[in-house]
Image (cartoon, coloured by chain):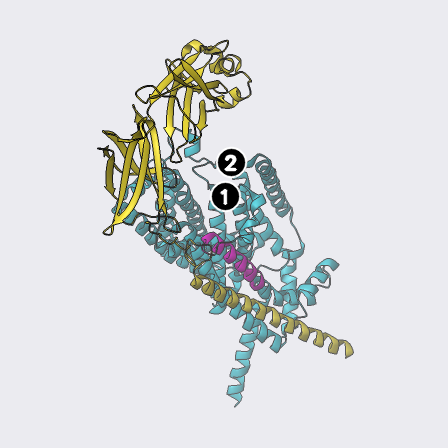
Amino acid sequence: MQRNIFKNTSFTCFLLALLFSFSIVAQETTVDDYKLSFSFKTIKKFDNTRVLEVTFIGKNREDRKDKIPVFDAEIKFFNIANDEEILLGTAKTSNEGIAQLVLSEKQKYLTDEDGYINLTARFEGSDVLDAEEEEILVKDLHLELNLEEIDSVKTIFVKAFTIDSLGVQMPVEEVDVIVSIEGMLSKMKIKEGTIENGEIEFELLQNIPGDVDKNFTVYAQILDNDEFGDVIQKQTVNWGTFNKLNTPDKNKLWSEAAPIWMYIVLTILLVGVWANYMYTIYNLYKIKKEGKKINISQEEE
Amino acid sequence: MNLENRKRELVKEFSPMLEKTTKVSKIWMGILVAVILVGIYAFFLQLFKGHEVTGMRDNVVWGVYIINFIFFVCLSYSGAFISGILHFFKTPWKNSVSRIVEIITVLSLIIGPIFILLCIGRLDRLHYLFLYPRIQSPITWDIIAIMTDLVGCFIYLYLTFIPDLAILRDNSENAPKWRQKLYKFLAIGYQDTTEQRETLHKITKTMSAMIIALAIVAYSVLAWIFSLTLQPGWNSSIFAPYFIIAGLYSGVSVIIVAMFLIRKYYHLEHYIRKVHFVSGGIILLIISLLYGYFTFSEYFSRWFSHKIQDTNLLNTLFTRYFWQFVLANYVGVLVPVVILFFKKFRTIKSITFASVIAILGLWLNRYLIVVPTLETPYLPIQDTRPEFIHYTATWVEWALSFTGVAAFILFFILIMKLVPVIPMSGIIDQEREALDKKGKTNQTITE
């Protein structure tokens, strides 16, 4: 409900919403009661695009459950190297306080001498909110995912490497990776392990349910890595099984149509009873007809 | 003996019952109308304000309305059952009670279902029951059974009325014209010829057999509305026969009370004699023993199985509903049994008293079947107001309940103004049979 109230304000921060909101809580609460959290992360996706994401929320200092997103705040994203600052783009925080910028796979980054990309997210502040800035240093990791069936064993190969200035692939070490399968609502974790010498392989379970065409999607994810950030790779493969959908029950106590015996019994009962009613009415008609005849003959006499 | 003259005599004998309304009778009818008017006010109050004016809430969704519904509908079924048996087996003393039973059957079957309508919160959606019926639902079966039974009972009642209507048509020269026209229309040209008489007897007998079968089916369906659920206190395999016996218990009791009142008020001691009360009393004794046996079996198996929900229910019956339980299941059964068991207690008044106790006991028994069960559900509502958990009937519910009873009595009196409560045709039939027998005997002697 609070979100809806704040949404109508044109101001870029949550403070005015707090000050002018008509809720009792808002009247008693000030911006000082909230600690602002400005977190920044990068995700390299399977199509080699890179997502820069800022989460900007205010957390109540006393009540941990009370979190208010800072929405409509303009965030600027930079790539910085050797005092050179390149603006990658800007994005505004959503109703949930999240600002995202998607950089294409062709985006060129400035790196330092160790190959690190300096990415910075900046909120330049407003009348009531202070400026915020956070930087992260990541290396551009290349994650490859190969699915092969070797001697009837479905195997997942994950390969991770960086490319140095000379264009040579440099395998990575000691990087944790999670393999999961895309489900209806979220990703289901299948295996996890540590990449050594740039490679790791997993044996996949048998009889994993797929879609109608027996396809399912395998993900390899490196998450919250200090050196590489989030890196995701995925592959769709035709290794699944398809269980036919249960056909809805017919003619059961719980189905739309009743069991056939019920219709038969009910019909027999009702037809029997109503036929008897009809027979009775027919006989009454006969009595009436005879009565009429008698009346006519009496009148004639 | 000339039967036509005898018919004339009978009409003369019964016509004061039909045409004259005494001062006492008018006062009684006035009181009944007043009760009905209060009920109509209560009905509109409920219609406009909703079920808020009743004691029914989220937990206890059924109250005295459903109890009245079961009571009246069971009364009707038992009436149909008894009436069917009286006609089908040509019971010797049937003539004195058959019309009382038939009127009780039809009236209670009209009034009973009205109570179920009062239970429904959204009457505007009532037609959905007919538009989207589920054949698997006992509620649907009950609607079909009640409607079929109502039509059957009407036809049956009408069949038994026809010969009397014909007698009244032919012998009511001094009656008002509207009455003469009504008799002529309803008598459908019945002239009591041998052929007509045989046809009428044949279809009445078939209908009486049909009515017995229908009553058993409808009784069972009504019991299944409860017993096919998993609710503690309801989920029982003996509920259908238990309902049949309980229905007969109330039915016979109401017939005895009606016989007593009609006999006393209309001075029909010549027709409704002590023998009828004693016979009714013995039937009531047998049924009360059966009813007591079923009641004991029902509670005993629940107590012995000691399932948590059943135990909770029984605890409620022995604490919150202690006195009602004692009145319903001890007083309501044992007092009639004791009175009716000993021959010296079998007077008209004591048999009628036993019947009144049986009626009240049975109504309370119905209350204990419905309300305590709804108050002890599988998932108890927590942290809510006590009035949402427990049920107490409001004045609106009581007013509408008494309106049902008042309407029942009022319509009974009005029907007795249309045709005699003792079937004249039955008396004529008996005398005709006696004449035939005599004629045959004479013929044999002559031969």
Q: Is residue B103 magenta?
A: no
Foreground of the two, B328 or A40: A40
Q: Is residue B146 magenta?
A: yes
Q: Main secondary structure of the magenta part?
A: helix
Foreground of the two, B405 or A138: A138
For the point 64% across and 73% down, which residue is it? A287
**How packed is label 2: few (under 14 Cα within 10 Å), some, or many (20 or more)?**
many
Give the spatial CA distance, label 1 vs label 2: 10 Å
Amino acid type indicated by mark 1: Tyr
Mark nearer the N terminus (1 vs 2): 2
Q: Are marks 1 and 2 in contact (CB under 8 Å)?
A: yes
**How packed is label 1: few (under 14 Cα within 10 Å), some, or many (20 or more)?**
many
Foreground of the two, A145 or B92: A145
Indicate the chain on which mark 1 is placed.
B
Q: Quadrant of the N terminus of chain B?
A: bottom right
- Against B163, residue B124 (above or below) is above
Residue B188: image x %, image y %?
67, 68
Chain depicted in cyan: B
The residue indicated by pointer 1 is B65
Name the image quarter holding residue B360: top left
Say if residue A233 shows up in the picture.
yes
Query: Which region shows up in magenta?
Result: B136-156
The label number, if any, that marks residue B162 in the structure image = none
Indicate the chain on which mark 2 is placed.
B
The residue indicated by pointer 2 is B54
Residue A101: image x %, image y %?
45, 26
Disc 1 is placed on an element classified as helix
Name the image quarter holding residue A11: top right
- In the rendering, what colour is chain A? yellow
